[in-house]
Amino acid sequence: MKFIYPFLVLVPIALVLEFGNIGGHSLVFIVSALSLVPLAAVLGRATEEAAIYTGPKIGALLNATLGNSAELIITIVALREGLVDVVKASIAGSIVGNILVVLGLSLLLGGLKNGTQTFDARAAGTNATMMALAVIALVIPAVFALGSGDLRPTDMDIERLSDGLAIVLIVVYVLYLIYSLRQKSPGEEAQEHAGGATMRLPVAIGILAAATVAIVFMSEILVGALEPTAEDWGLSELFIGVMLVPLVGNIAEHIVAVQVAYANKMDLSLGIAIGSGLQIALFVTPVLVLVGILIGTPMTLVFNSYELAALVGAALIAVLVSLDGESNWLEGAELVALYAILGIAFYFVP
């Protein structure tokens, strides 16, 4: 991976292009997207080093939290500007992308290199169950909102329902963290004390934080150039929000999860992929609902039917993949295929 590090020079180049108004949207988009690849390599290396000291669970949580902090900042800014539908589309796309693209590519490439890979089925089952719970919680407001006549709650009731569910989801997420971090995976205790670290823990965490800050800036530049570039290509706003923004905005997490799966560290890879999606569903989304109240831009948890279909399909296949504690490249190909199917479907939504 060392050959990737010289490409960090793309970071200042992207900044010069953006703030110097040099080149068009497409050039800024391409350079900023490519700059995330070496940043992701640095983030992945630091994540692996931190995981040697902390174990794969805390290492994955650190990676997911630092990665999602960028998305939380960007979506709060979008919410303040009143772009509620774009925020919802981005949320749905992030959850679907983490399950189908990140996990799918991890299983695919990891399986092609290492054959059948194993992971802690108990932890994976817990994550899959929590993901199913989160998706059900996101479906309920839409079901109520689609009621007809006297059975349909008022818009104010829908807002209050969303606020209540947001609080419940945050509480459940805290309980999930407490439970999962206290559970020992088979062999995890030995791994925590294994040698092989080339960085001290404070150095690894410092690099994690610095890489995350750089990724935040590059992601903002990338997302800013994405919309006008996509419009030039004739893509719809829903397609941009669900398929493109989460895909390129979370590219760092994508590469890190695939990188550690390729190294046959499946517990860490699954922790990053599914853990990141869980954090979006159970923490970032309800936080956005509560922040919307504070800034005067209410956001309900009512997603449209297209987004709900994608969320339900992704959660269902995540549960099926996690049942046996083993993975192979074909399962990864199936996840990626479902993402391609959804992408084709969303492309034709006007």
Image (cartoon, grey):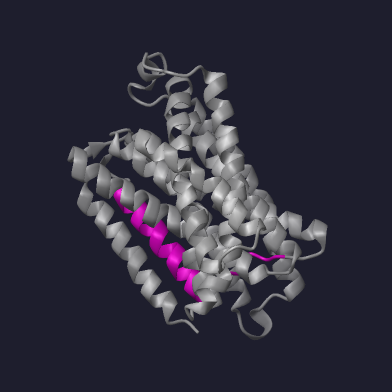
Q: In the image, is residue 305 part of the stretch drawn in magenta?
A: yes
**In this rendering, would 85 be left or right of 62?**
right
| Image quarter in which the N terminus is found | top left
The quadrant holding residue 78 is bottom right
**In this rendering, would 330 be left or right of 164?**
left
- Pick the front one: 129 or 22: 22
**Could you tell me which residue is drawn at 54 percent across and 46 percent down?**
11
Indicate the position of residue 15 as horizontal and vertical percent values.
61, 51
- Residues in magenta, as a range: 299-321
Indicate the position of residue 330 as horizontal and vertical percent values.
21, 53
The quadrant holding residue 176 is top right
**In this rendering, would 323 be left or right of 246?**
left
Q: In the image, is residue 175 part of the stretch drawn in magenta?
A: no
Indicate the position of residue 117 as horizontal and vertical percent values.
23, 38
Where is 71 relative to 304, above or below?
above
Report if residue 295 is visible in the image: yes
